[in-house]
Amino acid sequence: MKDHGDTGHAAEDKRRIGGVLMALENITLRFGGVTAISNISFDIREGEIRAIIGPNGAGKTSMLNVINGFYHPQEGKITFRGRARAAMKPHEAATQGISRTFQNVALFAGMTTLDNIMAGRALKMHRNFFWQMLRFGPALEEEIEHRRKVEEIIDFLEIEHIRRTPVGRLPYGLQKRVELGRALAAEPSLLLLDEPMAGMNVEEKEDMSRFILDVNDQLGTTIALIEHDMGVVMDLADRVVVLDYGRKIADGPPQEVQANQDVIDAYLGVPH
Amino acid sequence: MEERSASRDLVSIPALLERNVRKFGTSAAYREKEFGIWQSWNWIEVAEEVRALALGLLALGARKGDFVALIGRNRPAFYMSMVAAQSIGAIPVPLYQDAVAEEMAYVLGHCGARFVIAEDQEQVDKVLEIHDRTPEVEHVIYLDPRGMRNYDHSHLHAFDDVQAEGRAAHERFETEFETRRSAITEDDICVMLYTSGTTGKPKGVVLSNRNIIESARASCEFDRLTDKEDVLAYLPMAWVGDFIFSIGQAYWAGFCVNCPESSDTMMNDLREIGPTYYFAPPRVFETQLTNVIIRMNDAGPMKRRLFDHFMAHARKVGPAILDKKPVGLWDRLKYRLGDLLIYGPLKNVLGFSRVRVGYTAGEAIGPEIFEFYRSLGINLKQLYGQTEATVFITIQPDGEVRADTVGVPAPGVEVKIGDNGEIYYRSPGVFVEYYKNPESTASTKDAEGWVATGDAGFFDEESGHLRIIDRAKDVGKMADGRLFAPKYIENKLKFYPNILEAVVFGDGREMCTAFINIDLTAVGNWAERNNIAYSSYQELAGHPQVYAMIQAHVEEVNRAVASDAMLSGCQVHRFLILHKELDADDGELTRTRKVRRRLVEDKYADLITALYDGSAEVRTETEVTYEDGRKGTISATLEIRDARVCETTNDKAAA
């Protein structure tokens, strides 16, 4: 199966990956005296899977937080869809089409899978609170429309059997999938995944990889992901940026990055 | 009179479809749950879908007599595909969806299918993987387009595209379609089904239109099935039972076939649909009962007492009430109260509130399990059948249901017992032949049409019902000449919820021994309640307390067997608990989950030796196949235990 997928992959690359969706230029982020990210530039192109890797404490999650507006860098410029971006709040990032998942699952444990994903549609709801309380006329119509969308996601992620199960009762791998579902519910143009495979067994990783590829391929969503499992990164990513101690040490296609001496040193350490 | 002359034209499934469009028109023919909602197709829509696909297949160059393989779970699109293939003189061949590429290569190569209709990327990948060995496959059609965009589409088509093509080309192929459809006779092939085969390569059983239509008609009349029934189609489409229930009987009676959303949501969908006619192998009933018991054990003491009290009453009078036998007024009232408090809600949870007729077959069902469902007022019956018979050989009529027999010959079926105890039958449902295998056909079916079942059994003298002992070839003699019927003992063992599978040895030996597989759900739950920690199946299986529990079961079975004059020699003297579950992926079970005895014997020869040489434990290494086809090994040291056996009349006589 891999062969068919991969040959197609390479041949279609040109068509699939478009122009620059987001450009980060000379980003520096400090917390007091600590420089978490220093002078990093890279871009994310439309339709690609972009991996951010690096050893512990390299600044990967900080980078993701900069991208979705949770942290505001002291220096540097972020251009999203060709427009320079002012300091924004995460919910503003969400309205602009950026959604994310978290390193530690952040779902509403007492709510069902369905409700959790429905919550991801909150930004798409237009009727106000009172309309929704009445659940009548246009509000009802809207809800039906959203429900249809949510059901499509449930079908896409093959989680029909846990539709009505409170997510707190689900195994970890499935919770991660529900979280992906919630991020997808906002119909993002840029999806940020913070260690989507952390703590998963081989089978769960294979499933999750499949879903990430499918999201990218079928829905055309641009994906930026942080991941520690090198095998996964090499298989999934179109381009990889490598961070170490808040600096960018490599940027390029997976094979190239893998052969880079700085990257090898960063991961294995160098003799002093 | 009109009905009679009409029925002479009803010689094929496409003909039945035409009649159903006229007769039932807008009532539902199929339902499938998708996007959380039950979507339905009425008979008019079904006919339109079938026609569009048939025309599409013609546009792709389908010839009369072509084989069209189908791979996927139960979905209306697949059932309609089968009818579409039949409409243009092609022959549908449904395959097991969980078959590995290897098995699929054999079947596709054997029938030389030109068309494959596959459910999704996973199945398409399998077909492409084996393409160099199955060059006859010309077109692959897939239902779910997900992940398929980057594939080479020169011989790959989306299902919807084929239908659209068919609709667009209807001018060109209309005449051809009508000609082919009206040319179908009752002797034409209706379907070819591969038997999973407990031994050797699968065989393609060819069933004619007459086989299917006659069997469907007779069985519908037997249970008075009408167009008001609802069935849930969840059993493998490659299995003859599903073909008869979801196509044969559904088209004959005109009832609705409901397809679950996915295999994991089956239980939920069952509850939502509430079928009126239901079929399940014993294993499904067993699992459901195990779940009920587990959940009751976790319930509060008040609920548990109520449950135990009313279940005891149900066991006492339930079956009699179901069989419409005289029952006292007080007992009736109490049963009614129980129905209100316990039986009704329980049936609702299980999805059996509306079941009018339920069947189980394929293997013997435990008497306690069988009685449990019957005492709740569910009309569960047994039947005995085979692919070669188009299912029906014997069947239990209402009011004559027993746990240990399989009923009387089905309408139109003659049954006789051979000299060696083997069961033979002759009926309108008897298969045409094994495809490209005249030797096997000749050795199974004689010139007069009698078919050897391969099962040994006898007619119970008082009731006139058939009782199955075992596979005829497995029935053997022990070293001292006593009868050896392993299946009989295995079934008795398997009736314990803690035992999932058992394999008994003893042919030509002094004594019987057994391999046991524990049921991880039941034993795991027991372990949890008793604070027994375990990290794997293997560890739990080797636990001394688990051994003690299983030993108690084995000894109980020995006591029961000892009282049977014919089979008293089959008491289990020594046993061990296997370190892994027997698995179809390792070839130890068939896809329908029957034990492949010879293979197990060869694979675990070292364990069998240890069972007979008196050793107390044995070290072994076993190869296992993972779901993705990779292989690994597990090693273990297994304990072997002696079980107490009872003295039998024979022993006393010998002494």
Image (spheres, rainbow, N blue to C red):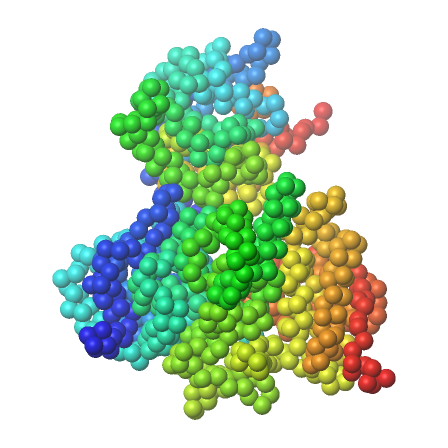
Q: Quadrant of the N terminus of chain B?
A: bottom left
Task: Single out the residue that lies furthest toward the front.
Answer: B329
Q: Is residue B405 above or below residue B476?
A: above
Q: Is residue B533 visible?
A: no
- Between B209 and A82, the one nearer to me in the picture: B209
- Between B250 and A23, the one nearer to me in the picture: B250
Name which quarter of the figure residue B257 lies in: bottom left
Q: Residue at x 67, y 82 (%)?
A: B476
Instruction: Tell whether A138 sits left or right of A187.
Output: left
Name which quarter of the figure residue B170 lies in: bottom left
Q: Residue at x 62, y 26 (%)?
A: A56
Q: Is residue B434 above or below residue B59?
A: below
Q: Is residue A89 visible?
A: yes
Task: Single out the residue that lies furthest toward the top.
Answer: A32
- Between A70 and B244, the one nearer to me in the picture: B244
Residue B652 at x, y percent in the picture = 83, 82
Task: Single out the residue that lies furthest toward the left.
Answer: B171
Residue B559 at x, y percent in the picture = 75, 70
Q: Residue at x 29, y 69 (%)?
A: B13
